Amino acid sequence: MQANNPKALAKDSLGPAFGGVLRRLRQERGLSQEGLGFESGYHRTYIGLLERGLKSPSLQTIFNLANALKITPSALIRQVESKNQEILQNVKKDGK
């Protein structure tokens, strides 16, 4: 991430923020990546890529994952927003 470019910081932190929230919710519900994939209609490798922040989900994917996790899409996005702010604050604090 580029510390001197706030827009790049925000863009670069969204993938890890979404991935972190997705992993936490999946684990809280006792699902494996394969289980979440089955429930949402995606392959486990895609779930892994999302959790590692290497892929960005479409709007349809967000809705499908939220449904599989028994959460509203808006609640999922709110959690991602919160996690993203946490990441950005940590990056700014660490000066990276």
Image (cartoon, rainbow, N blue to C red):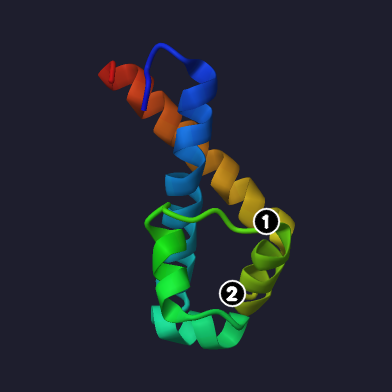
Sequence order check, earlier mark of 1 and 2 = 2
Quarter assignment of residue 20: bottom left
The three-letter amino acid code for the residue at tag 1 is: Ala
Disc 2 residue crowd, few under 14, some 14–19, many 20+, Cα 10 Å: many
The picture places residue 73, in percent across and down from the top left corner, at 71, 61
In the image, is residue 35 above or below residue 71? below
Quadrant holding the C terminus: top left
Residue at image x 37%, y 17%?
Answer: 3
In terms of image quadrants, where is residue 58? bottom right
Q: Amino acid at mark 2?
A: Leu
Q: Give the label on residue 75, or none.
A: 1
Question: In the structure shown, which secondary structural element does the residue marked by tag 2 occupy?
Answer: loop
The answer to whether any part of residue 5 appears in the image is yes
Mark 1 crowd level (few <14, some 14–19, many ≥20, 10 Å Cα) = few
Residue pictured at 37% horizontal, 56% vertical: 52
Query: Residue 19: where, in percent of width, then height?
Result: 45, 55
Q: Which mark is residue 47?
A: none
Viewer-proximal residue among 37 and 21:
37
Label 1, label 2: how far apart the Cα atoms are: 11 Å
Badge 2 is on which residue? 69
The residue at 72%/58% (across/down) is 59
Q: Which residue lies at the image location 32% right of the left edge and 18% below the top edge? A: 93
